[in-house]
Image (cartoon, coloured by chain):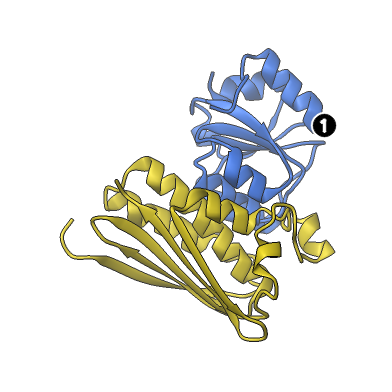
Amino acid sequence: MNLSEIVKNLDLVVCCGEEKLQQQVTGGYVSDLLSDVIANSAAGNVWATMQVHVNIVAVAVLKELAAIILVQGRSPAEDTLRKAREENVTILSSKLPAYETAGRLYELGIGSRK
Amino acid sequence: MGKPFSHSFIVEGRNFVQAGTASTKIKTMLKELGIDGGVVRRVAIATYEAEMNIVMYANSGTVVLEVTPEVVRLNVNDRGPGISDIDLAMQEGYSTATPEMREMGFGAGMGLPNIKKNADDLRIKSTVGEGTNLEITFRIN
């Protein structure tokens, strides 16, 4: 499944990275602890988090994540958005809380992080 | 690869906007050198944690990347508070991060344990009030 299908199904807002929505998604990870994401997410994952500050971009770049999904309708901080555009990181926003966002992803078949 | 490759990065303490830059550059360099993907992923995790430790706790630091045909080595040096009890700092979940850092999703007490898990060898030297030195080695084969 690619990002654009996820955006459509979960009614996500595309904060940046419109041009990369064809990217395939390998799985998902949910955490607000950056070291946890660095240690345990995998390339091509979508990452659902409450964190909106600029350091989430470096995590996504290093782990080659498909996209960051901000939950509870959060928007990226201004410098986060700027950095994400520079680094070609896709940021999406979900109106749902993390648990429900993950549940909806699971229903779509985005089942494991590998 | 013939000659050993080496590159040095400066990391500023408390500069959260620049944080992660050295790790990202190191990952790109290793990929360009044709280092195995699994090794690159392990180095990236360890470098990120080491870099974030400098950003969060130290005044300044350097990360020196060295690549030989056998190993990738990171030498991480900082000027900062040092670590008074290294055994305690190595325990998963132990952290001296401030509440502000924790709110940002740092201070999970996973930094040094993540480095150790992903490296083939980790040596820590630290002097309280002066700084900390990490020598982190990854075997390529």
Residue B56 at x, y = what percent? 67, 69
Q: Is residue B13 above or below residue A45?
A: below
Give the quadrant of the N terminus of chain B: bottom left
> Chain B rendered in what hue?
yellow
Q: Which residue is mark 1?
A: A97
Colour-to-chain, blue: A
Side of B25 where A69 appears, left or right? right
Residue B114 at x, y = what percent? 58, 51
For the view shown, which residue lies furthest in the left direction? B2
Q: Residue at the spot x=37%, y=41% of the render?
A: B37
Q: Is residue A13 visible?
A: yes
Q: Give the image quarter of residue B112.
A: bottom right
Q: Amino acid at mark 1?
A: Pro
Residue A86 at x, y = what percent? 51, 53
Q: Is residue B19 visible?
A: no
Q: Residue at the spot x=53%, y=25% of the render?
A: A26
Tell which of B121 and A9 is nearer to you. Answer: B121
Tell which of A92 and A35 is nearer to you. Answer: A35
How dense is the environment of label 1, judged by Cα within 10 Å: few (below 14), some, or many (20 and up)?
some
Q: Residue at the spot x=26%, y=65% of the render?
A: B5
Q: To which chain does the residue with label 1 belong?
A: A
Instruction: Tell me how many marks there are.
Output: 1
Q: Is residue A73 above or below residue B12?
A: above
Q: Give the image quarter of residue B6.
A: bottom left
For the view shown, which residue lies furthest in the front direction? B87
Side of A14 where A95 appears, left or right? right
